[in-house]
Image: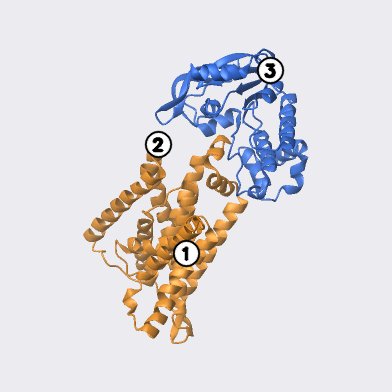
Amino acid sequence: MSLLELSGVTAGYGKIPIVREIDLTVEKGETLAVIGPNGSGKSTLAKTVIGLTTLFSGTIRFDGVDLTPVPPDRRALLGIGYLPQTGNVFPDLTVQENLEMGGYHLKRTELRLKVAEVLELFPELRDRLNQKVGTMSGGERQMVAMARLLMMSPKLVILDEPSAGLAPKIVERVYQKIEAMRGMGMTVLLIEQHALKALKSSDRAVVMVGGRIALAGTSSEVSKVDLRSVFFQVSRG
Amino acid sequence: MGQIPISLLASSLYATAAVGLTLNYLVLKYADFALGEYITVGCYVAALLTLSGLDPITAMIASGLSGATLAFLADELALKPLERRGATALQVFIATIGVSLLIRYVLSIVADLEDLLFLSSGFRVVPLIYIGNRPLTNLHLLAVSVLVASVATLTYVSLRTKLGKGMRAVASNRDLAISSGIPVWRIRRFTRLLVGALAGLSGALWAYYTSINPESGWRLLLWVFAASIIGNFTSFPLTLLGGFVVGFSENLGMWAVSRTLGVPTAYKPLIPYIAIVAVLLYRYRMRFKGVFES
C-alpha cells in the first residue's frame, strides 16, 4: 500500500481549479520529486494534500485513511509534515517556541526529549533558542522551519521549494538536511524548481506543467529527458 | 491635578477592553464590533449583583464570566460558522455589527420590560486620599488593579502556557499553525473567552462608576477602538498606551483646553475622533513616506 495516493484530484482556490486530474502515489521511504516551471501547480498540489485548497474532485488517501473529511490540523496529526515555500516559521516566536509549536501535541516530558533529539540534527540552533525567528537570516529561518517540521515526527515530509531564494552555500546545507531525513527513512515529497538538484536527491520524479502531470518516471529516467522541451511543448500545447 | 483620578479610571477601563479588542484582531483577524455589548452585559451583571448584596469583587468576576460566555456564544453561533463557509475578515467584521445590534436590542427589550433602562450599581465609593480637591477612591484603585491584573495574566498566559503560545503562533502565521497540527479552533475559543472576560470586567468598572443603560457599552466602543487603533491592533503595550492617551486627553487634556481656550468640556467626545484621525494620518504618511515626494 502506498503511503500517499492521489487519484483524479482536481483542486484550486475558491472556484478556480489549478491542478487537474492528478494521479500520484508516494511509496513508504521513497523521495518523490515534483518539478516544473513557475505556475505549474506544484505548490497547489502540496497545499491540496495538506487541505489548504478546495478539492473539486478525486480522492486523497494517506496511510490508508481517506483525507477528504479530515480538517487540515488533523492531517498534521496523522503524520503529514508540511514546509511551505514562504511563511514557514512563526516570526514573532523564539526558536525554542517554534520547535515547541511543531510538537504541540506532545506532553511536556516528551516535548523536552524531542527538542533535544531534533537539536542533535540542527546543532547550529542550540545557541539561538531564545532568539526571535523574525530577526534571523533566510537560511537560519529555513533551518528553524525544517527543525520545527521534524518535531512533528512526520511519516511524510512535504517540502515546498526548500531552496528558493537561498544562497548556494545555504542550499547545500538544506540539501544535507534533506539527505539526513532520507537517511532516517522518512518519506519525502520534494517540490522543486531546481530540477537537477531535485532529481539528484530523489528516487522518482513527476514533471508538472499547466496544472497536470506531463511526465513521470524514476529520477534517472526523467533526468535523461530534455525538460526544457517538456515545459515548452506542453505549456504551448 | 484634580483630573488625575478620573483620567486614571477612564484610562484603565478603556485599556482593559482595548487589550481584548486587539487580542481578538491579532488572533482572529477581525475587529469585533459586538465588544460594546459584552461590556454592557458586564455592566448589568455587576450592577444587579451588587444591588442584590453581593460584594463588588465577586460581582466583577461574574461580569467577566458573563462577557466571556457572550463572546464565546457569538463566535460559536454566528461568526465561526460564517468563517467556515469561507467568509472574509471584512464579512465577519460586518457580521459582528449585526451581532452587536441583535444583543443590544434584546437587552433593550428585556431592560424595558424589567424596568432596568437606567440603573445604578450598589458599589459604595469610598475616598482614600485627596489629590487637589478631588478624591482618589477605592474605585480608582480597583480600576488600576483590574488593568494590572489583566495585563499580568495575559502576559503570563501568552508567554508561559501552551495555549498562550499557540495563540501567539496563530496570530503570527495561521496557515502554518494549521499545518503544524496546532488546534486552531480550540485556541479560537480560548481567545474569545479572554476577549469577552476583559470586556465584562471593564463593564463592571463602568457600572461602578456611573449609571448604566442598554447602550452603555456601545457608547464606550469609540474610546476603546481609539485605544486599539493607537496600538495598531497589533501591539499590546501601544494599546495600553492608547487607553491612557485617550483617557487622559479627554479628561486632563480637555480640562486644560477648557481652562485656557474656554472650550466647553461637553466637546470631550471629540477626543477619540481626533486621536483616531491623527493616528491614521500619521500611519498613512509613514507608509507612503517618500512615495509622493518622488
> Chain B shown in which color?
orange
Task: Determine the residue positioned at 56% across, 58% down.
Answer: B153
Q: Name the residue under label 1.
A: B15
Query: What numbered label is drawn on residue B86?
Result: 2
Q: Which of marks 1 and 2 is nearer the N terminus?
A: 1
Number of residues whose C-alpha sits closer than 10 Å to that of mark 1, classed few (under 14), some (14–19) or many (20 or more) = many
| Chain letter of disc 2 in the image | B
Residue A53 pos. (x, y %): 47, 30
**Pointers 1 and 2 in contact (C-beta within 8 Å):** no
Circles 2 and 3 on the same chain: no
Viewer-side label of 2, 3:
3
Residue type at numbered disc 3 = Asp
Of the two numbered discs 1 and 2 in the rendering, the one whose residue sits closer to the viewer: 2
Residue A130, x across and y down, in percent: 70, 51
Q: Quadrant of residue B13?
A: bottom left
Q: Distance between the residues labelled 1 and 3?
A: 58 Å
Estimate the spatial distance between the alpha carbons at disc 1 and disc 2, rounded to whole Å.
32 Å
Q: Is mark 3 on a helix, strand or loop?
A: loop
User: Which residue is nearer to you in this view: B59 or A7?
Assistant: A7
Q: Which quadrant holds the N terminus of chain A?
A: top right
SS at circle 1: helix
Q: Using the image, name the chain to which the residue with label 3 belongs.
A: A
Q: Do the residues indicated by labels 1 and 2 lie within the same chain of the protein?
A: yes
| Outermost front residue | B294
Residue placed under numbered mark 3 in the picture: A203
Residue at x-position 49% and y-position 28% = A70
Q: How far apart are marks 2 and 3 (CA)?
A: 39 Å
Give the colour in which the image draws chain A: blue
How far across and down, in percent of the image, does residue B161 sit?
A: 60, 49
- Residue B151 at what x, y percent from top left? 54, 61
